[in-house]
Image (cartoon, rainbow, N blue to C red):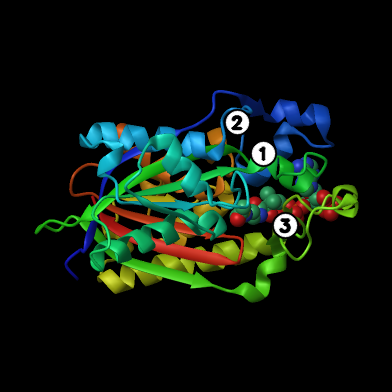
Amino acid sequence: MKRPIAQLVGTGRYTPEKIFDNAYFETILDTSDEWIRERSGIRERRIAEEHETLAYMGAAACRQVLDEAGLTPLDVDGIVLGTASPDRLLPSTACDLQAELGAHNAAAFDVAAACSGFLYSLSVAEGMIASGTAENVLVVGGDRLSKIADYTDRTTAVLFGDGAGATLVQPAGNGKRGILSTYLKTDGRLAELLYRPGGGANHPPDEQMLQDRTYFIRMAGREVFKNAVRSMADACDRALEKAGVHGDEVDVLIPHQANIRIIEATAKHAHVPMDKVYVNVDRYGNTSAASIPIALDECVREGRIKEGSLVLFVAFGGGFTWASVLVRW
Ligand code: ACO
C-alpha cells in the first residue's frame, strides 16, 4: 500500500431549510409519492432560497471546516469546487466563494465533472499537495440543481436537490492516514444521455432556447441507470485493487446518492454489506457533486467514521464521468 501524500482534515456541509417533499410534486406533475420512492428511494429534497447561491452554500460549508481545524480563511491556499450548476458562467463559482469566504490567499477554480465533481476535485487537490503548489486546499462539492431542473419534466424534476459539502486537504503526516488510491474515468461519447443542450457558447441564450427549454437538464434515465450500475461497480474494484484492499475490509462506503437501487447494486458488487453503506438519498435527493461531501460530513458527525476507518467513495455522473477514492480516516 502506498504511503498517502494527502489527507482529509475535517468536514462541513450546508443544506437549505426549505423542503420539497414528494407530495409537492404530486401537485405540479403527473407523478406519485409511491412511484418516486419505489424507483429512486427519494422522499424529500432541500431547495435553495434566492440568497442561498452556490457560493453562499459552499462558503458556509468551508467555514465549518476551517473553524473546526482552527484555521482562518487567510490560511487557505487553494479552493477547488466541483459543480455542474455554477452561479454564473464567468467567473467560476470558486472565485465568488473565495470572495464570500474572505480566502484572499487562495487560488480558486471550478472542476466540471457533474456528480463525480467532488472526487475529481479531491484528486486535483491531492495533485496540488504532491507538487508543493498548496498546503491547505478546500475541496468543495456543491450544486443548486433546482435552478437547472425542468419542473415540467417528471422524469428529472423529482430527482434533484440543492446543497454543498466541503473538506480540507493537507499534506499527509508520517502515519497511514490519507488518500490511499484514486480512480478517475470518463466516456465523452455518452455525453448526450445526460446534458444541458442550451446556454453555452454553442447555443447562447435566445427565444428558441426558452421555448424549447433546452437550458434545463435532460437525462435518458434508464440508460444512465445501467451505465451508473456498471461504472460504479468497476470504480469500486479499481480503487480497492490499487490499494490492495478487499471490499470486506471497508468500514464505510459512501456512494453518490442518486438512486437507492444503484447504491444497493454497487454495494453488492463491492462485497460491502448495506449496514456499512451510508444512505441519505431519501432526505436530499440527488445533489450531484454535493452528495458525497454532505454524506461524509453526516457520517463523521454521527461517529460512523472514526480515526482509522477505511472509507470508500464512489461516484457517477454526466460526461459520463465516474470515480472512486479510498481513504484511511
Ligand atoms: N412519476 C411517474 N412516472 C414516471 C416518472 C415520475 N416522476 N418519471 C418517469 N415515469 C414513467 C416513465 O414515463 C415510464 O413510463 P412508460 O413505461 O409508460 O414509458 C416509466 O415511469 C418507467 O420509466 P423509467 O425511466 O424506465 O424508470 P426507471 O425505473 O429507470 O427510473 C430513474 C427512473 C429514477 C430516473 C432511474 O432511471 C435513475 O435513477 N436513473 C439514473 C439517474 C442517475 O444516476 N443520475 C446520476 C447522475 S445525475 C448528474 O450527473 C446530475
At a point 64% along the width and 59% down the height, the residue shown is: 225
- Report which quarter residue 242 is drawn in: bottom left
At a point 57% along the width and 37% down the height, the residue shown is: 162
Q: Quadrant of the N terminus?
A: bottom left
At a point 79% along the width and 43% down the height, the residue shown is: 154
User: Callout 2: helix, strand or loop?
Assistant: loop
Q: Which sits in the foreground, 76 or 221?
A: 76
Give the amino acid at mark 2: Ala
Determine whether label 2 and label 1 are within 8 Å by CB. yes
Label 2 sits on residue: 48
Closer to the chain start, of discs 2 and 3, is 2
Closer to the chain start, of discs 2 and 1, is 2
At a point 60% along the width and 43% down the height, the residue shown is: 87
Question: What's the distance in space between the residues labelled 2 and 1, CA to CA?
Answer: 8 Å
Give the numbered dot on residue 146: 1
User: Callout 1: helix, strand or loop?
Assistant: helix
Give the numbered dot on residue 196: 3
Closer to the chain start, of discs 1 and 3, is 1
Give the numbered dot on residue 199: none
Query: Can you tell me whether the CB of the residue at mark 3 lies under 8 Å from the nearest atom of ligand 1?
Result: no
Give the amino acid at mark 3: Arg
Give the amino acid at mark 1: Ser
Left or right side of 104 for 204: right
Q: In this view, does 149 lie above or below 70?
A: below
User: Callout 3: helix, strand or loop?
Assistant: loop
